[in-house]
Image (tube, rainbow, N blue to C red):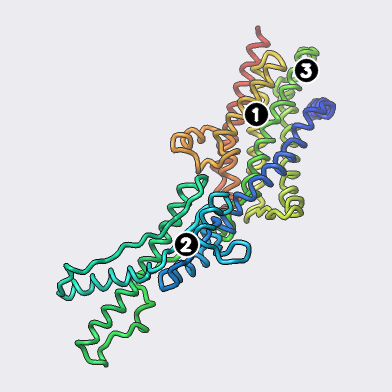
Amino acid sequence: MRKLSAAMRKEFLLLIRDKIGLAILFVMPMVLIFVMTLIQDTAFRTLNEEGIPLLVVNEDQDSLGFRIENGLKTSDLVAYHNEINGKKATRDELYEAVKKGKFLIGIVIPKGTTKTIQEEVKRLVDESLGEDVSNVQVTSTEIEMVIDPIASKSFVTSVTSQLREFISTVKTRIMFETFNAQIAEFIPDDLEVKQSEYSNKQAVTYKEVYASEISGELKPNAVQHNIPAWTIFAMFFIVLPLVSSIMKEKEEGSVFRFHTIPASYFLQINAKLIVFIVICLIQFCLMLLIGLVFLPMLGLPVLQLGNSYIGILIMALGCAMAATGFGVLVGSLAATLQQGAVLGSLLILVFSAIGGIWVPAYVMPSIMRTISELSPLKWAMDGFYGLFLRGEGFVDILPHFFKLALFFAVCLAIAVRVQSKKRIG
């Protein structure tokens, strides 16, 4: 125990003397979290709170126009506007506003749109009742969607789907009214189908059911993504001070002097692992503190930790183990400090890129989602997503922890094997 304590003290002294390494471990992730969260917050708010900025010009001023306006006003998908500078927008002003990027989508409902639908429905009803409609001409009207070129195709598709729903609703209601009027001519008043009884009823409805307790209460936002993402990134970047520590021992000859004393190589490795795992856990706590205290001071959402503090601790420990094990492996493989720093940095950048740190893995192409499963950073992100957003508990995140623990064991086994060969050589 005394030998382990001495080795840990040596590792701690080496670490605190490395000012650049300490800056990488603590200052860099803080800066990344603040900058990336502030940058991404607007995008997340646009999707989750305010919706797509949309401008409507209702020239119809009838059933369909009002139905579209009322539907868009209550929609979570869009942020409804019909005015520019406090005045009702015109068609020309709408085109100009979308062109300048003030709105992603503009909708123009032409005059007479409702009348066109009424004519079409009347023709369908007359035809169904056996009347000759071959000479009846139905005019055509187009609702215009003016789209900013930067608007995502998925946004446009979503808005188009809502417009079709509104049109279908109005068309169905008008058809019901027309049929009701026609039928009323042939049946007694006491058998007449009353619109007030049925027009607002639907045989099939839907409801939203979330797959976990807190899903739906918590919406993905910049804080919920960036705190775990950049904390994991920072923990794995412990590879740099770890490689520096291993290289300094090689350059100064302390590793060879260590071989002359009656202590195993595992003692030296264990001392490094314990010290750097503790450092990773301190990093993790500081990053959580930023999400809980400092980011809300800037007007950003507070970090929601979910329901399992034990699960958070287990995932943090698994991530710290994987990060330190990887650092020891890189330090053992590298021949020089520069080689180790470059190799470690590049591998972490690759792991983070495919692991969903920069861009969430679920928005990646199918082939990249498959490749991302090879990244230990992805395993850690999945665990924290489960805890923070899906309401998962300790048992649910164990598979992610075991993956990280296995990665740690494999890295350590390879490092010991490589070090043993070098020692024999």
Between 303 and 419, the one nearer to me in the picture: 303
In the image: residue 96, left or right of residue 294: left
Please tell me which of labels 3 and 1 falls first in the chain: 3
Task: Please tell me whether mark 1 sits on a helix, a strand or a loop.
Answer: helix
Q: CA distance from mark 3 to mark 2?
A: 57 Å
- Residue at image coords 66%, 26%: 345
> What residue is shown with label 3?
248
> What residue is shown with label 1?
325
Q: Position of residue 341 (x, y in %)?
A: 69, 21
In the image: residue 187, left or right of residue 407: left
Q: Residues within 10 Å of mark 1 (few under 14, many from 20)?
A: many
Looking at the rendered structure, the kind of residue marked 1 is Gly
| 3 vs 1, front mark | 3
Q: Position of residue 233 (x, y in %)?
A: 65, 36
Identify the mark at residue 209; answer none if there is no mark.
Answer: 2
The answer to whether one can see residue 7 in this image is yes
